[in-house]
Image: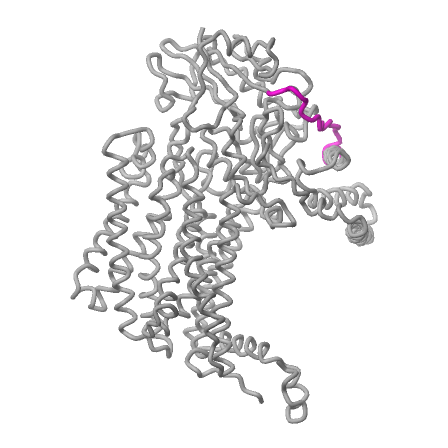
Amino acid sequence: MSEFNPNPSGLHQILNRQVDRRTAVATAAGALVAGLGLLQTACSPLAAAESKEKAQLNWEAFFQGNYRLMTHKEKDETVHRLERLHALNTGNQVRIGTTAAKEGVLYGYAFNISKCRGYMDCVKACIAENNQDRKSDMRYIRIHEHNKGQMSFEAAEDSFYHEVPAAGHFYMGTQCFHCQNPPCTQVCPTQATWLEPDGLVVVDYNWCIGCRYCIAACPYDARRFNWGDPQVPEEEVNPNQHYLGNRLRRKGVVEKCTFCIQRSRDGKNPACVEACPTGSRTFGNLLDPDSDLRWILKNKKVFRLKEDLGTEPKFWYYMD
Amino acid sequence: MSATLNPITIPAEERLRHPLVQFFLDGLREVTTGSPKYHIWMASLTLLMCLGAYAYSIQLREGLTVTGMHDHVSWGFYISNFTFLVGMAAAAVILVMPTYVLKDHDFKKAVLVGEALAVAALIMALSFVVADMGGPDRLWHVIPMIGVFNWPASMLTWDILVLNGYLVLNLLIPFYLLYSRYMGREPDKRIYVPAVLLSILWAVSVHLVTAFLYAGLPARPFWNSALLGPRFLATAFTAGPAMMILVLRQLRKHTDIDVAQATIDKLATVTTVGAQICLIMLASELFVEFYRDTHHGLGARYLFFGLDGHTRLVPWIWTSIAMSVTATAILSVHPLRQTDRWLKFACTLLFLGILIEKGLGTIIPGFIPEPWGRIDEYAPTWVELCVTLGIWAMGTFVFTILTKAAIPVELGNLKYRRR
């Protein structure tokens, strides 16, 4: 995006400019960790080499820069560090991808109001796919149960506990609309959230300082905050991850729907699209004239929500 | 400079001590000595700060989940207090401008008090922001040059610049004036007058930029109003002088400082006019929000009348309005305003009224209802209240030591002596 200021930054990135200084800091950091490790070993002879490694990796992770400004090599080092840390912490392997945006791709989404019946399979699939905090029951998708005869979100109900579809109602899902002119990225003081070239609005969870200005700026309630330590049972962790997507988060950072970047950039549909039993959800490339999405935009009467705010959401609704 | 001192007549030990060091040592001695009353006062503040630190340690360990905030009211008591205190800091200009620019000597004695108040308010405001952060350990990401500073796009980066700049100005100006006085020199007008002029512009900008932080969000119609900035300034220039009157009365009672009655009278006039302007702005806002009931007015409806049976803020806002209206009425009657007892009563009412209005009625209704109309109310938890109390205690502590050290210097009782 043009708003992006490509100043190489982040302590790591600054240090990167002058190799000798960087080496000096790395050596100093290494020496410190080694010293601490030595102290620890002296105190408890059984202390594993693993805990030393963990301390070293956490130390390095603390000083990592903004993901968007990293070189390919730095990105690789960063995800390897995270993978290793997960293995040290849990004994399980995860794969954290760094797949970049492809040329000629701009993702978009269409939602068929006539078909959705409020089954919530999308919500369940989303939580499982994206490793969302189970403790706070975090959800990226909200299904609003509207009363027939009006499309008023104020009058709609998004927490209903009865058999669906309920008579006299229709259903509408909201999530991040991946605006092409997003107010949330503009307000971020550290550029920890941004619009990718393929149209995905993503967050660097390691760079976010947790000020929550983006949550205040979003007119669609798309963003979620980790108020406490996020909890995902180890056996339920989806090991197929992306740095900007469903990798495990920590407390105090903002997260959101990424159109399942770990799937979409590998040519798959997001989990919500795949899980929907009614076919209400269509995901695709807006720049591909043969995509289903483009067919819908061309042949259906589509609309978007809160267009008056000029956010240019890439999420359309339509009816059959 | 020590280099200019005569090395033969001054003992070696004293020669090494720069007058600047002596200045701070004298200041330190001044703030660590005092009456038993003073020590009890400081000990109480320290106790409250410890309570705040304890509560904050819980928040650090567990995360912001121990606060009353949630995804739908994602800023709460901390950011509300921050907003109020930026206003208090900006209000220091009320004393600074007449003294240095209009050469009104009635204000001269009080101006250092105003600047100390600004410093204390800024330290509190910045502390509230830090307390609200999800990752305070990652705050270095926002330091220009070291992190990524999203300037000029993000209003938060503007706020960081203006608040820290204002803090530096409000530390440097009084420091220069006091140090000159300490050294028995006349301060150089060519140095401090431009700095003072800059700080006056800066004061207006700190509160305006803070308002823009919210007003620039079309997602939140309650804030998305051109009146928000001016209204912030009006409330600040009302609550600030009201607070100053109360503080100056206390200082007059407990310290040697001689505050002229004319100073208090002039501040009272400023407070009165400010309070009247605040009420006009309130009326304007109420008219726009309620003449035609639109969805954009739902936040205001929630605040003033409650929405779908959710009425948590309603008693607070009407208490606040009742306080402000009563205070404005008292202040507007000249004989009452000129009576010390009534003035104290009105200033207390006004300060509390605006504190409630800013503390509960400005930030929270911006989030209620959330963008899709759901109403999830907010109330601060004991952790938030204790951290808040701790930060206020810290600000009061800072203000106390700054004035305690500044007053004897200003009065000429504490001067540099070559021993």
A196, above or below B69, in the image: above
Q: Could you tell me residue B193's position as x and y percent?
A: 44, 69
**Numbered circles on residues, count:** 0
Q: Could you tell me residue B142's position as x and y percent?
A: 59, 47
Q: Could you tell me residue B354's position as x and y percent?
A: 32, 52
A257, above or below B189, in the image: above
Residue A96 is covered by the magenta coloring: yes
Look at the image and give the residue range highlighted in magenta.
A87-106
In this view, which residue lies farthest toward the front?
B190
Q: Could you tell me residue B408's position as x and y percent?
A: 44, 79
Locate residue B144 relative to residue B51 in the image: left or right: right
| Quarter containing the N terminus of chain B | bottom right
Locate residue A84 relative to residue A117 in the image: left or right: right
| Quarter containing the C terminus of chain B | bottom right
A25, above or below A101, in the image: below
Residue B129 is covered by the magenta coloring: no
Observer-nearest of B410 and B137: B410
Observer-nearest of B170 and B198: B198
Observer-nearest of B188 and B205: B188
Q: Residue at x 44, y 57 (%)?
A: B202
Locate residue B402 relative to residue B327 in the image: left or right: right
In this view, which residue lies farthest toward the bottom?
B9
Locate residue A309 relative to residue A93 in the image: left or right: left
Q: Residue at x 38, y 39 (%)?
A: B223
Q: Residue at x 39, y 36 (%)?
A: B377
Q: Which quadrant would residue B199 be assigned to in this image?
A: bottom left
Magenta residues, dominant SS class: loop
Observer-nearest of B22 and B287: B287
What colour scheme was applied to this rendering of the protein? Answer: one colour
